[in-house]
Amino acid sequence: MAGTTEKILNRKKEWTNDKDERGRNVLHYAASTGYLHGVEYLLQNCDPSNMERDKDGLFPHHLASACGHTQVVKKLLENCPNPSEILDNKGRNIVHIAAIMGQFDVVRYVLKDANDEVKDMINAKDYDGNTPLHLAASHSRPKIVQALTWDSRVDLHCLNNNNQTALDAFQQFEQENNPPFQQASIYRILRLLKNSMHI
């Protein structure tokens, strides 16, 4: 497969710059499918303009994060001078996206193995003021809520644009959407933190 990709792109290098109706190029698709060798090849041999947003504002990094392709996320970040500037149309970085989509392995990579600039994204706010913890709580991702709340670098007091902590955002979501049983663990985690820290 790898040899075929290289042969095609060596003959038709201009294809790497072509975009589909969603504004995505081949790097977007290689990243979204977890095709690590293809991502590596494209990063080494193609125009750096491939690091572009699609029509939804998603970079290849966002798609790899959304699909849980940790090795691809890592490779893309190695070739990215300012990862904190890789934001979608809603101001969300790769940690926000991983939190929404429930991609625990990507969040774990950022918390444990990523460089400091990437780790700084764990408290970043999107345009609504939501951190990855807010989004993990409101999208019912208990494993990610637990990982983030156990990390001492995560700001549990952070308020979004509605003056809500992650617990507040979760409680509003719970009341509006009448969530199923699985959210009980998120509520317990956040409630225990609130009681122990008086937030």
Image (spheres, helix red, strand yellow):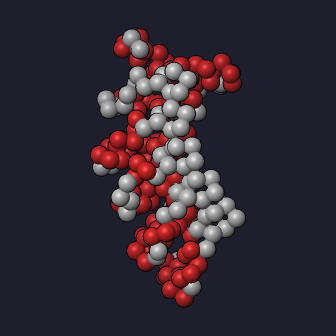
- Report the side of 166 relative to 179 (left or right): left
Q: Residue furthest left?
A: 116
- Report the side of 6 relative to 193 (left or right): right
- Report the side of 78 relative to 185 (left or right): left
Q: Residue furthest bottom?
A: 11
Q: Position of residue 97 (x, y in %)?
A: 52, 44
Observer able to see residue 102: no
Relative to 198, residue 59 above or below: below
Total marks placed: 0
Q: Residue at x 37, y 31 (%)?
A: 154
Residue 84 vs residue 106, the one in the foreground = 84
Q: Residue at x 50, y 27 (%)?
A: 160
Q: Position of residue 6 (x, y in %)?
A: 49, 81
Screen quadrant of the C terminus: top left
Q: Position of residue 33 (x, y in %)?
A: 56, 61
Relative to 20, residue 104 above or below: above
Residue 8 vs residue 165, the one in the foreground = 165
Relative to 183, residue 13 above or below: below
Q: Residue at x 52, y 62 (%)?
A: 52
Q: Residue at x 49, y 64 (%)?
A: 51
Observer able to see residue 10: yes
Q: Position of residue 172 (x, y in %)?
A: 61, 20
